[in-house]
Image (cartoon, grey):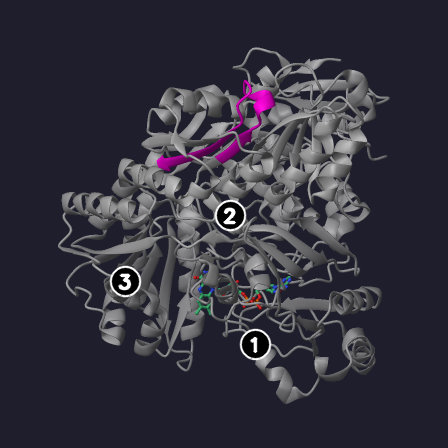
Amino acid sequence: MATLSPTTSEALCAAIAEAASKHARLEIRGGGSKADIGSPWGGAREVDILDMRKFAGIVDYDPPELVLTVGAGTPLAEIETLIAAKGQMLAFEPWDHAPVFGRAPGAATIGGVIAAGVAGPQRLSMGGARDHLLGFEAVSGRGEKFVAGAKVVKNVTGYDLPKLVAGSWGRLVALTQVTLKVLPRPRQQATMIIENQTPQQAHAAMAQAMGSHGEIAAAAYLPAAVNNGRAATLFRVQGFAPSVDARCGFLPRLLKDHGDVLRLPDADAARVWTAIRAVAPLAGSAALWRVNVPPSGGCAVVAALEPLGARWFFDWAGGLVWLTFDGDAALVRAAAEKAGGHAMLVRGPEGLRARVPGQHPRSKGVDALEARVRRAFDPAGVFETTRFGDVHAN
Amino acid sequence: MSLIMPAPDRNVLDRRDEIIAALKVIVPGEGVITETAALRPYESDGLTAYRQPPMVVVLPSTVEQVSAVLKWCFENNVKVVPRGSGTSLSGGALPLEDAVLLGLSKFNRVLDINYADRTAVVQPGVTNLAITTAVEGRGFYYAPDPSSQIACSIGGNVAENSGGVHCLKYGLTTNNVLGVEIVMMDGEVIRLGGRHLDPAGLDLLGIVVGSEGLLGVVTEVTVRILPKPETARAVLLGFPTVESGGQCVADIIAAGIIPAGMEMMDKPAIHAAEAFVKAGYPLEVEALLIVELDGPAAECDYLIEEVAAIARANGAVTLRVSQNDGERLAFWAGRKAAFPAVGRISPDYYCMDGTIPRRRLPDVLKRMAEMSVKHGLAVANVFHAGDGNLHPLILYDANQPGQLERAEAFGNDILRLCVEVGGVLTGEHGVGVEKRDLMPVMFTETDLAHQQRLKCAFDPALLLNPGKVFPQLHRCAELGRMHVHHGKTAFPDIPRF
Ligand SMILES: Cc1cc2nc3c(=O)[nH]c(=O)nc-3n(C[C@H](O)[C@H](O)[C@H](O)COP(=O)(O)OP(=O)(O)OC[C@H]3O[C@@H](n4cnc5c(N)ncnc54)[C@H](O)[C@@H]3O)c2cc1C
């Protein structure tokens, strides 16, 4: 296992083309914060690491245009600091996975965040990584540099390849540069809390709030078991002060039948959302699953798995269930499917990850289509490291 | 007409009767249209400069029928052009002489509404506005609002990734669609996405949206619905120069405000609109700006003052704040009628759709004025100012020899300019046939080949809506082999089709 660290697109093209001609495989890596997701390499062929961190730096940033172009290897933290200084944010709330695996944060790169489709609690109201990637420059598995999308916020010229590349886990292209939509950072945030609800009650309260004029930015539920014995249903509202105040006044009236709605002190609120975003309530080494379902499906998932020992919490108003479960993985997948969604194995011991695919298996038709799409970008399977399922023969 | 489409397949044209007979078996009754007169309404979409009667129109009403039609066409090497309501402004639904036109108008039912999950499942022929109509009784709406929303279908919106005046804040179609069912050219039916967020694997939904009918026929759409904002207020602003109007837009965004809508009109557009609807627009200003804020009343009241202050600081000579919904709608009346207003002062107009970085607006308008002189045709501009999406309307008269060609040449110059200043060919109307031949202005051969190989993954025989979006039809085998060394060696010039 060698590590390649090209510094120019030309060198990157050459490295990928050479790997393709030798039938070698490349694991594209940024900060490595998510390296423990997916199957440990079990492929017959050698896997080399393609380190993208040399493609770093701010290329263009014009705050009023709401557009930021950076090298894909730029650390997420550096970008956040830069745009926060201009009162802006990445609205999909990307985060660093390192602590999930007990490692120190700080290494995550924007390229890795995009390739893994990482988003935080605000995904609920503001969209995910896919919705904020406007354009990119990359080298495909053919060893060819190309661009897609654009550097303006509104564009429908050609296929929307940025959507495809966001969440593609390094299986289509090596991203060298990304153009992101940035948005104004809210002037004020407030979090309202209802305590001691059951999951069903929390779901009902969240559904009502989401369908109201409360303009909820994020909604989560921490059951007592992961929140020091006190269940918490949390609603984040944000924006300009008069609006935030009005909505904080409105929510207790709206939700009066659900219980007392109180305002959480700001410091506590900041702490709890940071924890939720980074899945801190489920820290440890137990197998960690990320279950995406329609919000109304969350309760059924936990009802099936909690009696068997699962610990969990809801984000995205119930549409994202984080859960730790050391029982049969097939039960998690079955519960997710039954609720109309899917489950990803995010953390687990090597043995488990070798046996259980990281991504939820797709229907036969979608699986075949995905394979054809991957081959369109990567005909030699350079980026197929066996990390996510089978390798196409070549 | 300067447009070159793929040469019709003689063999297919000769088999027309056989093809019609086969379609009638799959779609019995009225669903197959063959008479010359009855085909005429389908001969163009919203880009009426291009016309071509289809070989035959088929209007299936079930997914099984769509699948069987596509499978039969696939097995018999017959091309298919999907069509929703036919309002495309880029010729995406332009028929081909040797293709079956597959209309989705019978897929007009709302299938399911789930208020707890805030989703609606609809058939593709449901109009954009009908989704809102179906959910507004409960205080919800579907956010993307193309001006054509009373007519255009959600299937067409998905295909074009359509936007509207509110997409700065609420996103384009792609940001509001959660799932689709599509039928691929070989008849296979697959579902992408669902009622949850984010896919298990590749985001194939993300590329189907905006694929202009080239990847699959959309037979069901799941959209996100939102609670209707509590209030909306607008401010009408007039500026003595385009620069000051543009600076006002930049300052509003720099102040952290993302308005629900922010529309600009230049002087010719203001005059045309005012003459048509008497909205009370100031006629002496160079740029008119409508800024709409929506949300909680407390927020609108606060932000309207902020916006007014920013406008004053930028030298606004007109500043009117809507005091009620009637006034707000009156501000919009002129903007909403801008297209027909221009249609009144000119026999024909040609609507462009480029996007530019907003900071380049004054420069772009200046150069557009120069082009207007060069081509001898007037132009009026309406502009989604918040996101830099320009809609120049080129005024011409198709009955005057040469004017259409000049209008097209002018339009192409504008789009080249958009790309030159860092923008794109189309912000919401799609490439279709209209901007197809300009794609190389924005993308290299290598860029385009990476897009076209995606088409091969869905439709390797290139039978679904060929001749749209891409200037050259490369066979998939050829694309597979094509190799560009160090991104330089472009493959030799292959003639258009
Ligand atoms: C007056 C006017 C105003 C407009 N304003 C706007 C605007 O504000 N914003 C905007 O974005 N657009 C606007 N448009 C453009 C147009 O309305 C949109 O592009 C719309 O989405 C097209 O929908 P349609 O149903 O008419 O599709 P069609 O015109 O029938 O088809 C458009 C494309 O979609 C494909 N297609 C249609 N249905 C399907 C399906 N079910 N499956 C697969 N492919 C399909 C067709 O093959 C074609 O390529 C406007 C048009 C007009 C005439």
B83 vs B145: above or below: below
Magenta highlight on residue A228? yes
**How many residues crowd mark 1 within 10 Å: few (<14), some (14–19), many (20+)?**
some
Q: What element carries label 1?
A: loop
Q: Which chain carries label 1?
A: B
**Label 3 lies in what chain?**
B
* Residue B72, percent from left and from top: 82, 68
Q: Which amino acid does label 1 sit on?
A: Arg
Q: In this view, does A52 lie above or below B77?
A: above
Q: What stretch is highlighted in magenta?
A: A219-238
- The residue carrying mark 3 is B325
First-in-chain label (3 vs 2): 3
Q: Is residue A280 above or below residue B153?
A: above
Q: Which amino acid does label 3 sit on?
A: Asp
| In this picture, residue B318 sits left or right of residue B485 | left
Residue B47 placed where, x, y %?
A: 50, 70
Residue sitting nearer the eye, A105 or A329: A329
* Residue pointed to by mark 1: B51
The Cα atoms of the two marked residues, 1 and 3, are separated by 41 Å
Disc 2 from disc 1: Cα separation: 27 Å
Image quadrant in which the C terminus of chain B is located? bottom right
